[in-house]
Image (tube, grey):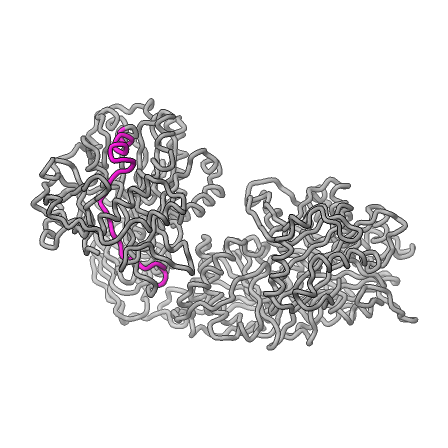
């Protein structure tokens, strides 16, 4: 490959050259064939226009042309018309013929970005796209015209950009023709020039072809033709990172009046611009051309950088006559030939050791030489404020630039028309994340700065003001803090200054570890896996990176950390604190003794103040109902600022980060925190520039306080104080023990004996802390039942009136009456039916919406229909309920709250938090019992009475779940795939006494955000309303768990008290035949029946 950019363009019919030498002097032998590229592009349905354009640049590459434009072949451009001198009157009639297009295809990989560069924050909390959108809205208001607006996105930026507009600017997002999709071209093997291949990530085989693709994209997509047909004549194009480039009516009128086919906006070069390309006149024909640095011979470098000779550079703000563009495209056979730009990269941009490739690009401004009669105009610097390097980003974020009323970014008038010259260390601050680390204390003032030079690692703050010519150097390997106050005309050496001390972050090398994809409830593995080298650290760093990428500032507000107290909990908390400090966290809230139930974490995030300390998220250390201990399971998950589990886009980002991680950040010298004592620990840096606060908070306070606002504790206490009422709450040595004591003993005055197994243990006392009939053995026996929920002989022993159990992290519940089991599905339905007895719902006008997971029985559906509630069937996973709860507040949609939701896996809750809440369900049932027992002189209305009364009104949904735990994952997946593939043939099939009306794989379209979740469970929906469902659980710590759900509705009042096993016997046999689990997994005997 040539070492300089080639500007020879060859096609089937011609050789187009910028050089002064004759084509005969060029070796035109093509060593590599274009056909493999054409085949690859055609397979992706890329347009012929784009293929032809790429073929042109490809042929230029293989021709070996140097592309050098010698100084003696060009002349400087004479004076150009200045926009400030225009006397042309603005003409608003032209707006109906004009389209504004922003180029938005760049990822900013040179700055270390892997998302749309335009999503970088540039001023306060506003991104480039925020300001662009606001510019469009303001432009339309000012011009009183709905000026057409378009974005040219690339395959790398499209999804992020469109999602951004949908969330923040839905009116713009909904406009027809908003997006013009940039084409993609193959990366080329640097040795063979054949299309590069990369099996681990096929998307990495492609790259954007540069903004010169604008012309091919307009032609190949048919948009040029449609714009012309709709009467559009003029197009104004600019980069999305140039916030000074807005539609100017005077310049538009001048362009229209000049009748030029193409006009480039230029600025006069300054010292900051001397290494960039410039405008020139080709001596051979007087044509305006662009000469980039790669087109300049070494001996011509002084002339190239002479800003007094070559005075103008391209801003990439272009005005194009669409009709003239169409003529040129037709002239050259469907595309515009543009000079080639060659970039040497690796096929995986994050892996320097991957295959070396060549990426070919073109620049749209180079088309100036293709338009006969093209012109240029000098515009003020106010129309040019791009970000190419971290130098630019720091400058724009500072007070040296201001945002105008029409949302342009312009140089602060106080700068006197000359921007500060920025020379921050290009090696240390090439990447945005390095600059962000340097600016963790805020953006310094640059408005009075003439030149700022920084060599080495530094940290800056908003209290620092640079004035005049300032040079800062630090030759140590630790970032040193630039003092606050005015720093004027000085050279500052920070090498020997104090550093961060205990707050000093270090970067520890690491690498991807397989199997870190979070499930619906976070990441769960064996404890010893988490204790392995870098396993926890990798996941935590990947989470911090994903959270920052989502727009969260870790330095503002608080990070909550807590868990269910299982083995390794304490150690993990200390690690997360140290890593949090290294990643910029300034304040932590840690649950006392490291304990916080999952619903309590949600309550802390949502309820705890003050506002300036408000939590933005939390790490929850739990494997929920899985066993704990050194040989058992551990888990971690992240909850966001609404208190709910991280949405799928965040968990996907976390997983993606785990697959590419190279290092993690940690403050190894940060002191261990005593998490057993409530109070604050403040750790300050040696230089006084930073501090981190770790506050150990009461584990129960926020959650208990919230529950007291929801329920009538006086009414519940009256029930509990009855002589004929007794209860026992088994928290199974999990985290809910302290909450049970705080509510039942401290608030409601009950005996300590009501709280069973209430002291948390790191191995849950050797128990499986899962609140069901199988694992809550002790409680089930106390309540007079066996593991099938059938009554046992208790003799003369008095059985408590009410029993409940919680799981390890306190979000699940099991409800029992005296010798009576309440299924989770019935529990959900009954709480919904009785919602008005709970003040939280009654005071808000009553319950509005209910939701259940798809496998949960349809009992609540009957209540919703009867009481006219909104009803939703979602996939398993509390995050889906959270979206519905936040429909109005976050998404601006319908308000479904107050809201109750539940899952058959013993999870129930409401919109008071964004997690299921075990103790909330207990208090809800106690409220229901209290409402039915207001007269203490009358016999006690029992749990069984309430359930049977409900069945009498609504009928009974006979229901059970069989769990096959620890089966081989490959075999279980094969079984699921078989049922999935047989869906069509099973539909209409008769099996035993049942006809399958529908067999499918459940797909959920979220009514709030429109997201689609597929493969959420195999369903067999019978003609009589019965259901058989299969799911493969992804939250177990080892092996796989197949869950089989059986449901049959019975409206006949004479058949409401059958045993579940008898009622479902035939349907269970059908289910086992349909899945053939014995063949695939070697058993049809469940480990758990619920």
Say left or right for 688 vs 963.
left
Quadrant of image for the C terminus: bottom right
Q: Find out whether residue 740 is within the magenta segment.
A: no
Q: Residue at x 34, y 35 (%)?
A: 219
Check the image and name the residue furthest to the left: 72
Say left or right for 910 vs 540.
right
Q: Is residue 279 visible?
A: yes
Query: Which portion, as a residue range, is magenta?
Result: 324-351
Q: Residue at x 39, y 59 (%)?
A: 198
Eyeballing the image, is 844 above or below 497? above
Quadrant for residue 343, please give it.
Answer: bottom left
Judge by depth and name the residue closer to the eye, 108 or 975. Answer: 975
Eyeballing the image, is 759 above or below 153? below
Say left or right for 277 vs 223.
left
- Which percent across, then down, holds residue 1033? 63, 61
- Which percent across, then down, holds residue 100? 35, 34
- Which percent across, then down, holds residue 1015? 60, 53
Quadrant of image for the N terminus: bottom left
Quadrant for residue 188, please give it.
Answer: bottom left
- Which percent across, then down, holds residue 1074? 71, 57
Judge by depth and name the residue closer to the eye, 690 or 64. Answer: 64
Q: How many marks?
A: 0
Judge by depth and name the residue closer to the eye, 153 or 30. Answer: 30
Q: Residue at x 9, y 38 (%)?
A: 284
Quadrant for residue 285, please give it.
Answer: top left
Say left or right for 622 vs 666.
right
Q: Is residue 439 visible?
A: no
Q: Find out whether residue 334 is within the magenta segment.
A: yes
């Amino acid at each position: 490959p040539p070492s300089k950019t080639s500007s020879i363009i060859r096609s089937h019919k011609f050789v187009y050259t910028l050089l002064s030498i004759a084509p005969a002097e060029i070796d035109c032998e093509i060593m590599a064939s274009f056909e493999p590229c054409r085949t690859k592009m055609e397979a992706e349905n890329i347009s012929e226009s784009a293929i032809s354009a790429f073929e042109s640049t490809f042929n230029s590459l293989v021709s070996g042309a140097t592309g050098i434009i010698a100084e003696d072949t060009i002349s400087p451009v004479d004076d150009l018309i200045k926009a400030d001198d225009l006397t042309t009157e603005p003409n608003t009639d032209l707006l109906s013929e004009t389209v504004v297009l922003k180029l938005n295809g760049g990822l900013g990989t040179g700055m270390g970005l892997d998302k749309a560069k335009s999503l970088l924050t540039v001023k306060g909390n506003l991104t480039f796209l925020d300001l662009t959108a606001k510019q469009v809205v303001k432009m339309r208001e000012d011009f009183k015209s709905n000026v057409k607006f378009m974005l040219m996105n690339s395959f790398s930026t499209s999804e992020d950009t469109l999602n951004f507009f949908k969330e923040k600017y839905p009116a713009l997002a909904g406009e027809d023709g908003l997006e013009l999709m940039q084409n993609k071209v193959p990366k080329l093997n640097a040795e063979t020039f054949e299309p590069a291949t990369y099996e681990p990530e096929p998307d990495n085989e492609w790259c954007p072809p540069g903004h010169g693709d604008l012309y091919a994209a307009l032609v190949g997509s048919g948009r040029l033709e449609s714009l012309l047909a709709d009467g559009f004549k003029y197009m104004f194009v600019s980069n999305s990172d140039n916030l000074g480039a807005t539609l100017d009516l005077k310049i538009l009128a001048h362009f229209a009046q000049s009748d030029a086919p193409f006009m480039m906006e230029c600025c006069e070069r300054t010292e900051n611009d001397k290494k960039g390309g410039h405008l020139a006149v080709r001596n051979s024909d007087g044509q305006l051309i662009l000469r980039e640095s790669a087109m300049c011979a070494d001996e011509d470098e002084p002339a190239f950088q002479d800003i007094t000779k070559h005075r103008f550079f391209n801003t990439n703000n272009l005005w194009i006559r669409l009709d003239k563009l169409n003529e040129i495209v037709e002239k050259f056979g469907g595309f515009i030939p543009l000079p080639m730009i060659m970039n040497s990269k690796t096929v995986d941009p994050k892996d320097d050791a991957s295959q070396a490739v060549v990426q070919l690009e073109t620049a749209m401004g180079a088309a100036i030489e293709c338009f006969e009669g093209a012109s240029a105009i000098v515009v003020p610097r106010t129309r040019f404020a791009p970000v190419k390097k971290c130098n630019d980003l720091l400058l724009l974020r500072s007070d040296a630039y201001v945002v105008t009323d029409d949302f342009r970014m312009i140089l602060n008038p106080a700068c006197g028309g000359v921007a500060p010259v920025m020379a921050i260390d290009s090696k240390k601050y090439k990447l945005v994340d390095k600059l962000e680390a340097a600016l963790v204390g805020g953006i310094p003032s640059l408005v009075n700065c003439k030149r700022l030079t920084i060599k080495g690692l530094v940290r800056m703050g908003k209290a620092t003001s640079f004035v005049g010519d300032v040079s800062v150097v630090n030759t140590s390997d630790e970032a040193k803090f630039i003092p606050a106050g005015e720093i004027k005309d000085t050279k500052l050496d920070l090498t020997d200054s104090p550093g961060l001390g205990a707050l000093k972050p270090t970067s520890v090398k690491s690498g991807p570890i397989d199997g870190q994809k979070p499930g619906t409830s976070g990441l769960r593995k064996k404890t010893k896996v988490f204790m392995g080298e870098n396993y926890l650290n990798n996941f935590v760093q990947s989470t911090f990176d994903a959270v920052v990428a989502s727009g969260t500032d870790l330095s503002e507000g608080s990070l909550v950390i807590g868990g269910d107290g299982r083995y390794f909990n304490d150690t993990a908390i200390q690690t997360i604190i140290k890593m949090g400090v290294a990643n910029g966290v300034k304040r932590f809230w840690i649950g006392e003794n490291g304990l916080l139930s999952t619903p309590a974490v949600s309550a802390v995030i949502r309820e705890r103040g003050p506002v300036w300390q408000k939590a933005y998220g939390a790490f929850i250390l739990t494997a929920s109902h899985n066993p704990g201990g050194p040989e058992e399971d551990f888990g971690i998950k992240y909850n966001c600022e609404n208190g709910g589990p991280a949405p799928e886009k965040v968990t996907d980002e976390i997983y993606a980060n785990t697959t590419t991680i190279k290092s993690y950040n940690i403050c190894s010298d940060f002191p261990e925190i005593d998490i057993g004592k409530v109070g604050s620990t403040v750790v300050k840096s040696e230089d006084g520039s930073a501090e981190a606060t770790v506050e150990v908070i009461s584990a129960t306070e926020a959650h208990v306080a919230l529950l007291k606002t929801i329920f009538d504790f006086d009414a519940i206490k009256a029930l509990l104080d009855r002589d004929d009422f007794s209860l026992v709450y088994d928290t199974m040595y999990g985290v809910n023990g302290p909450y049970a004591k705080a509510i039942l003993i401290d608030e409601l005055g009950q005996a300590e004996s009501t709280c069973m197994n209430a002291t948390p243990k790191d191995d849950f006392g050797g128990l499986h802390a899962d609140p069901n009939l199988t694992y809550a053995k002790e409680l089930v026996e106390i309540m007079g039942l066996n593991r099938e929920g059938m009554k046992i002989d208790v003799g003369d022993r008095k059985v408590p009136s009410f029993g409940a159990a919680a799981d390890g992290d306190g979000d699940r519940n099991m409800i029992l009456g005296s010798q009576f089991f309440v299924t989770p599905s019935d529990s959900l339905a009954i709480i919904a039916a009785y919602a008005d007895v709970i003040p939280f719902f009654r005071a808000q006008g009553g319950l509005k919406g209910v939701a259940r997971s798809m496998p949960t029985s349809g009992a609540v559906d009957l209540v919703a229909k009867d009481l006219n509630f909104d009803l939703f069937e979602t996939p398993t996973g509390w995050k889906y309920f959270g979206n519905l709860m936040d429909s109005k507040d976050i998404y601006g949609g319908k308000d479904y709250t107050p809201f109750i939701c539940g899952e058959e896996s013993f999870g129930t809750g409401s919109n008071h938090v964004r997690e299921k809440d075990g103790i909330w369900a207990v208090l809800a049932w106690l409220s229901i019992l209290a409402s039915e027992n207001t007269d203490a002189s009358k016999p006690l209305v029992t749990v069984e009475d309430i359930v049977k009364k409900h069945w009498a009104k609504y009928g009974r949904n006979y229901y059970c779940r069989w769990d096959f735990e620890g089966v081989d994952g490959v075999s279980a997946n094969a079984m699921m795939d078989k049922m999935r593939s047989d869906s069509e043939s099973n539909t209409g099939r008769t099996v035993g006494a049942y006809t399958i009306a529908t067999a499918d794989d459940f797909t959920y379209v979220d009514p709030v955000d429109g997201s689609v979740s597929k493969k959420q469970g195999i369903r067999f929906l019978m003609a009589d309303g019965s259901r058989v469902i299969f799911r493969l659980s992804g939250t177990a710590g080892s092996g796989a768990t197949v869950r089989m759900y059986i449901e049959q509705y019975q409206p006949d009042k004479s058949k409401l008290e059958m045993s579940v096993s008898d009622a479902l016997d035939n349907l269970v046999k059908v289910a086992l035949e349909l899945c053939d689990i014995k063949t695939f997994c070697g058993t049809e005997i469940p480990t758990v029946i619920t």
